[in-house]
Amino acid sequence: MITAMSLPTRRSVPGVFVALALVLALGWLVVTVDGGHLFNQSTTVSLLHVAAGLGLVAVGQTLVILGGSLDLSVAYVVSLSTLVAAETMAGRDGALLPAIGLALAVSAGIGLLNGLLVTRLRINAFIATVGVGLLLKGYLDNGYDGPSGRTAPALVQTLGYQRVGPVPLSFLLLLVVTAAAWLTLTRTRFGHHLIAVGGDPEVSRLSGVRTHRVLVGAHVLCSLCAGLAGIYLSSRLGSGAPRVGTEGLYDLESIAAVVLGGTALAGGRGGVLGTVGGVLLLASVDAVFNQLDVDAFFKQVIRGVIIIAAVAVYARRTYRKARS
């Protein structure tokens, strides 16, 4: 199982990072011709901040997709966790740790519910997580008309805006979470079992793997990552935001980043390193378009073309490998 997992991971990482380098090179050329500056400090910091929020969600999404599942409730988990964190902090540094703990606990509870619906009630992951997302949407729409609560100043000053050179602390947090997820997938029994379940759940079950427990764990970790992203966004916004997750399209964008990174939607093949490359690719495209003041509609069209092209290339390679 280790070989089956690590080989696709090594193959997916170079491809997405080569695409990232090409996008940055072409973007730099076009922006320079247009009279702008793509690689100045403000643009770099902004790009990494965007990548941090989406990346945290996408790393969690990678785990459930590797297990052959999916989570479309993450955008609402992000929004809810911003509110739980900001309302609990209420602008007090002394309430920082309890607020973070409560936000993560609520997120983990939602992930547990998703996992149980998928495994115990055998509801399709798409339907189950959309249903949970709609429940959260109803609560957010009825309970909040706008921002609520106030983030502790200590969190705003550190996670929200502090940097090490041009690198925000939030992006360093993403790297830490990515490293932890990579170690989990490559060095732990849970990670090996997760890959095996995504590859063939029936064979995994017959081999003694507790498939239900593995998938529930993956959903909990996915929601925890979304909750962490919500805490980060609350530090950037200074308050809770009931629609920040859906307005940021974190559900679809996270899946797009996973696919761009080379992880198979059917599960069992891929890894978090490729996902980070996909996140950086999407953030770079945004940065280039923002410098060029590209129309929002056209921006989404180009992003869609990039995602479709990536999936087509991956599918063609998979088909060729299957024939050979």
Image: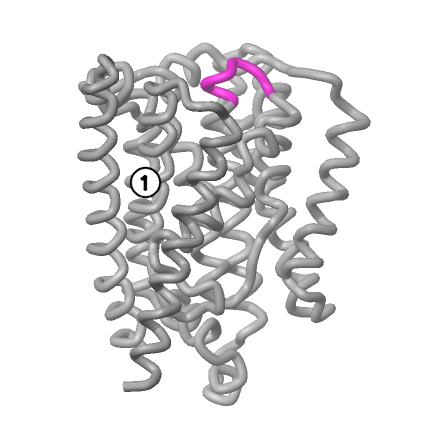
Q: Residue at x 23, y 55 (%)?
A: 15
At a point 55% along the width and 68% down the height, the residue shown is 213
Instruction: Name the residue rendered at 47%, 23% in the picture.
Output: 295
Quadrant into which the N terminus falls: bottom left
Q: Residue at x 55, y 26 (%)?
A: 99
Q: Nearer the viewer, residue 86 or 198?
A: 198
Q: Residues within 10 Å of mark 1 (few under 14, many from 20)?
A: many
Counting every numbered tag in the picture gives 1
Instruction: Work out which residue is located at the far bottom of the displayed protein and give it.
Output: 206
Q: Position of residue 97 (x, y in %)?
A: 49, 26
Q: Position of residue 175 (x, y in %)?
A: 29, 40
Q: Residue furthest right?
A: 142
Q: State which quadrant residue 83 falls in.
A: top right
Magenta-colored span = 234-240
Q: Quadrant of the C terminus?
A: bottom left
Q: Determine if the magenta segment contains residue 119.
A: no
Mark 1 = which residue? 281
Q: Amino acid at mark 1?
A: Leu
Which quarter of the picture shows residue 122?
A: bottom right
For residue 2, above or below residue 239: below
